[in-house]
Image: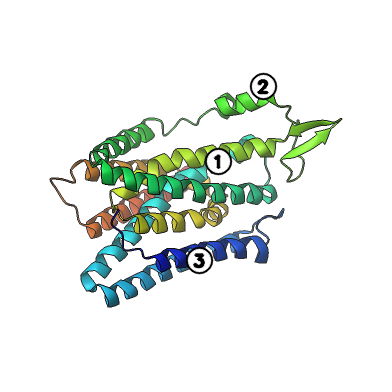
Amino acid sequence: MESIGTWWMWAAFAVIVVAMLAADLFLFKGGEQHRVSLKEAGAWSVAWVSVSLLFAAGLWWYLDDSFGRMIANEKALAFLTGYLVEKSLAVDNVFVWMMIFSFFAVPLELQRRVLLYGIVGAIVLRTIMIFAGSWLITEFHWLLYVFGAFLVITGIKMVWFAEHDPDLSKNPFIRWIRNHYPVTDKLEGERFFVMRDGLRMVTPLFLALVLVEISDVIFAVDSIPAIFAITTDPFIVLTSNLFAILGLRAMYFLIADLGDRFSLLKYGLAAILVFIGTKMLIVDWVKIPVLVSLLVVAVILALSVTASLWHSTRERARIA
């Protein structure tokens, strides 16, 4: 696998990830029961985006000094495009999390701990999947076409089922847990397990955590092939993906109260998936520059957000 990443670049990135997670967990008590305010979520969102942009700037500066302006521009643009694509697709994950917590009636002050475990699990899972994907694409180039077709089909399905929410009560894994382990009738604070009359029971909070982790797997299957359409460099793929994931928890709390204002966003995300999938399908015949991909994704995202805000404003005015 060809990559610009040297051992010290990988090490520096690992230090950044661990340091930010440690700051969230220990300095800001990310693992404790705590209701995240809109101000706090906004501050953390700005912090995560700022760290990501600083990383991109540092990457460009190093590559410009070591390999020249052309390589620096190419890799920095690939990072920013991958970051924007992953950040965009992660929005759909946020809405799924909102639905999961609503289904189990998990209050905001208990959600933060579940999402912390969810983000850590997503980091481990995506790291494994990205390295596996890089190796597979290197060995079997034709998999790009499989990934491309999968993304196009996923985008079409997203439009088709945009108005249909899944029935979480019928989730096979949750049904399996309920059939094999006793589940408490209500939440037990931030605990995942409790003892009742010598019997170990799982709480609804644990079931919420299970669904959060399952959603991470499902969205990784969509998002990781999408970023391979931008670049196959594992360093760029992993860093842009994980930076987008690291800021996902803050983004969740930032838009938790605004979910109804982005009702049309799914259509924009579907269009992004179809575009990225098509890009992969024609890669050997038509080379779409990374800058063009970045602009297309940004325009689609901006249009879908603007349309969503206009639609929600119009609906509220009609109801009033």
Residue type, numbered disc 1: Glu
Q: Work out how far the residue at label 2 is from the one at label 3, CA to CA, in angstroms.
A: 42 Å
Q: Nearer the viewer, mark 3 or mark 1?
A: 3
Residue 276 seen in render: no
Q: Residues within 10 Å of mark 1 (few under 14, many from 20)?
A: many
Between residue 75 and residue 86, name the one nearer to us.
Answer: 75
Q: Residue at x 63, y 46 (%)?
A: 114
Q: Which of the two labelled residues, at mark 2 and mark 3, occupies the earlier sequence position?
A: 3
| Residue occupied by mark 1 | 213
Q: Position of residue 237 (x, y in %)?
A: 36, 54
Dividing the picture into quarters, in which one does residue 20 lie? Answer: bottom right
Between residue 163 and residue 43, name the one nearer to us.
Answer: 43
Q: Residue at x 24, y 60 (%)?
A: 291
Q: Are marks 2 and 3 in contact (CB under 8 Å)?
A: no
Residue type, numbered disc 3: Ile
| Residue occupied by mark 3 | 16
Q: Residue at x 62, y 40 (%)?
A: 209
| Residue occupied by mark 2 | 179
